[in-house]
Image (spheres, helix red, strand yellow):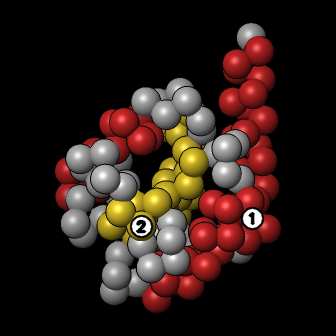
């Protein structure tokens, strides 16, 4: 079962990461976050809004870096929030630090377009 965070954004874990991110047919934006991180908490409403806006185009979710140390280490997370964009199971882009809604929207549009182009090729 997929857990939802307070703002109703999908929560990825070590148990569901392969299925929900690596094997996803859609591109995926993952935010590594920490419960003790004020900028991460500020991202919650933005992530929820973007998840709704991009439903069916890009999967959006969060990983609690403290509760998922294997994923934190696998992706060499050194600070939160860290946003990683995946397409076809591979890391495409990475951004560290909180981002504005407009910055994230531009990133999501680019990842979506890259993924669509890859599907056509």
Residue pointed to by mark 2: 4
Categorize mark 1 by other alpha carbons within 10 Å: few (<14), some (14-19), many (20+): few
Residue 42, given in percent of the width and then of the height, sits at 56, 84
Does residue 55 appear left or right of residue 76 in this picture? right
Mark 2 Cα-neighbour bin, 10 Å: few <14, some 14–19, many ≥20? few
Upstream in the sequence, badge 1 or badge 2? 2
> Which residue shows up at 49% across the image and 34% down it?
24
Quadrant where the C terminus is found in the figure: top right
Tag 2, which secondary structure? strand
Indicate which label's residue lies in the foreground, 1 or 2.
2
Q: Nearer the viewer, residue 39 or 67?
A: 67
What residue occupies the far front of the structure in this picture? 1
Question: Is residue 45 depicted above or below 80 in this figure?
Answer: below
Q: Name the residue: 46% across, 88% down.
A: 38
Q: Residue at x 60, y 70 (%)?
A: 48
Q: Which disc number belongs to residue 103?
A: 1
| Image x and y of residue 12, in percent | 37, 54
Relative image position of residue 19 (x, y in whole percent): 36, 36
User: Is disc 1 placed on a helix, strand or loop?
Assistant: helix
42 up-or-down from 99: above or below: below
Q: Residue at x 35, y 76 (%)?
A: 34
The image quadrant that residue 3 belongs to is bottom left
Left or right, 19 with respect to 73, comes to: right
Mark 1–mark 2 Cα distance, whole angstroms, equals 24 Å
Can residue 71 be seen by looking at this rendering? no
């Amino acid at each position: 079962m997929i857990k939802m965070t307070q703002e109703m954004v999908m929560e990825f874990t070590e148990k569901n990461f392969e299925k929900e991110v690596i094997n996803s047919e859609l591109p995926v934006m993952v935010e590594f976050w920490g419960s003790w991180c004020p900028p991460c908490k500020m991202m919650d409403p933005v992530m929820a809004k973007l998840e709704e806006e991009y439903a069916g185009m890009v999967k959006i979710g969060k990983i609690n870096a403290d509760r998922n140390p294997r994923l934190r280490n696998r992706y060499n997370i050194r600070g939160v929030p860290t946003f990683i964009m995946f397409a076809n199971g591979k890391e495409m882009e990475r951004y560290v630090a909180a981002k504005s809604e407009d910055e994230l929207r531009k990133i999501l549009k680019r990842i979506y377009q890259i993924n669509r182009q890859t599907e056509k090729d």
